[in-house]
Amino acid sequence: MHVQKAVERLGYTPHEAKVYLAALGLGESHVSDIAGRVKLPLSSVQLIVDKLHRDGLLNFYVRKRYKYWVAENPEHLLAKIREREDEIRAVLPQLESLRHGVHGKPRVKVFESVEEIRLIYDDILETKKHILGFIPWDSWVALLGRGFMEDFIEKRVRHFLRIRLLIPRSPLAQELRARDSKELRETRFLPKNFNIKTTAIIYGTKIVIVSLNKKLPTAILIDDPDICDTVTLFFEDLWDRSGD
């Protein structure tokens, strides 16, 4: 990429980028020297120099009543990027709240196929909230693959995300439960009369409901705090009625 274009992509106009690069190449210089290098009117260059000074890219000193301008180290450009990144991070919660739409309209997204359903686990990690789940474990592992699930468990543990699971009792489920303490998980077995065939995962303000239809497995993600709270109440009630 051309160096001037790179500077422009930081939010500067072509003339501003030219003035900064000219000052960088000239070293100590008067505004008139910079104007001569970029072939722009002196008054225009003075305005640009003042702006770049406010941005911390140009500085000056006075010697014998003359003002000499010096371009700051280009590392300042990286510092500006980090500063802007910090500003965005500071308002991310507000930006995220806007995603729910005006008047808090729930967001709904559909995932079709195993490959798309696996993407939900990326969202779980990015949301960084603890997880609740009703899962027919044997069927779920058969659908997504044991290797994929083991990989997710490792990532979840690295992110310090805890999970509570309600699953039917089976040899595979008992094997999972035996590893609860080291995998930041608490597992309870559903009552015998609960023969679930659909997965439901709750995290943050989101709930995912997954049909395990073998021909076309499909997931529906609903992002809405009220719906999430309601389903969580059912989870907690069933949690209290489930056992070891």
Image: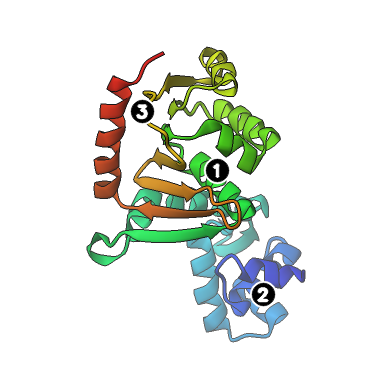
Callout 1 environment at 10 Å: few (<14), some (14 to 19), or many (20+)? some
Residue 193 is tagged as: 3
Q: At 62% from the left edge and 34% from the top edge, which residue is drawn? A: 149
| Percent position of residue 208, x then y | 43, 47
In this figure, which residue is indicated by the disc labeled 2?
18
Separation of disc 2 and disc 3 at Cα?
74 Å
Left or right: 137 in relation to 106: right
Amino acid marked by disc 1 = Tyr
Left or right: 237 in relation to 16: left
Secondary element under disc 1, as helix, strand or loop, is helix
Q: Disc 2 or disc 1, which is closer to the eye? A: 1
Q: Is residue 17 above or below residue 120?
A: below
Q: Is residue 154 above or below residue 71?
A: above
- Quadrant position of residue 200: top left
Callout 3 environment at 10 Å: few (<14), some (14 to 19), or many (20+)? few
Amino acid marked by disc 2 = Lys
Residue 121 is tagged as: 1
